[in-house]
Image (cartoon, helix red, strand yellow):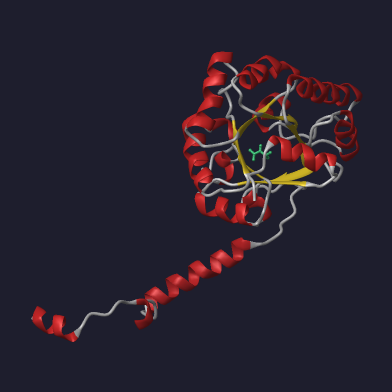
Amino acid sequence: MARTSTASLKAKRLNQEKITMLTAYDFSMANMVDEAGIDIILVGDSLGMVFLGYENTLSVTMDEMIHHTKTVSRGTKNAMVVGDMPFLSYHISIEEAVRNAGRFIQEGGAQAVKLEGGQERIPVVKAILDAQIPVMAHIGLTPQSVHAFGGFKVQGKDLETAKKLIRDAKALEEAGVFSIVLEGVPTKLAKQITESVSIPTIGIGAGQYCDGQVLVINDMLGMYKGHIPKFVKKFANLEPLIMEALKNYKQEVEAGTFPADEHGFTISDEVLERLY
Ligand code: KIV
């Protein structure tokens, strides 16, 4: 099976096959997501909230992202690995943005990068594309703009912002991005955006008409105790299972029932006798 590429994603859209994408932040999880046949693994800056325990995504650094991208890449054979450019890694200068994007590829082993923003990001997007690095865009409720938006609010509900999102999507396509994540956008607007471009759209809280879907893995597996947005469906509820296992472990160690004989290693009596 060949690794997901920008071309295979485009073909999926053309063939009206849905694209699947999930986040992952570590080797074991990436390995499972890859084996499940998910098309794209995003090493999202959601890492900051669900993995590193920050309040939002703004504190995540390039070094943290690269560290986790490396482990995800090592656990992945078929999925496309996309590195999420963290806050301030592409805002200060174009040169810095290209260097940081390059780190995801060169050090992290990713095949593409994602960055948040619309028309205002076109020069940065073009410079990264010039360095032969595929770019996935991300518009709508972009979490790095949480303070500018005044909270995590659905975007594009009024005429002006809805029109702006359509303009942003078209401009990003024209600049050359291979796909656009639409986050926190009304379902019917996401449909219009999807119909107004010819590259795949990947929705999160953007309804069923996008070409693909993405979720944060800890949310969809029921492993995150913080706030879970309305658009998340829990495909499993692992937290109670993990808690039960942890409590059983504690109880068995304290009671002396774990480890049992079958968990230990043997030594010959002859060697043992010679120890005394
Ligand atoms: O960081 C992330 O996980 C993301 C997805 C929610 C798209 O950007």
Q: Residue furthest front?
A: 1
Q: Residue 62, image x and y in percent?
A: 50, 30
| Residue drawn at (62%, 33%) of the image | 112
Residue 93 seen:
no
Residue 161 as seen in the image, left or right of residue 110: right
**Residue 68 vs residue 225, the one in the foreground:** 68
Q: Residue 269, image x and y in percent?
A: 18, 86
171, above or below 178, in the image: above
Q: Quadrant of ligand 1?
A: top right
**Residue 62 vs residue 170, the one in the foreground:** 170
| Residue drawn at (82%, 25%) of the image | 165
**Residue 118 vs residue 201, the one in the foreground:** 201
| Residue drawn at (59%, 67%) of the image | 241
112, above or below 3, in the image: above
Q: Quadrant of residue 272?
A: bottom left
9, above or below 219, in the image: above
| Residue drawn at (59%, 47%) of the image | 24
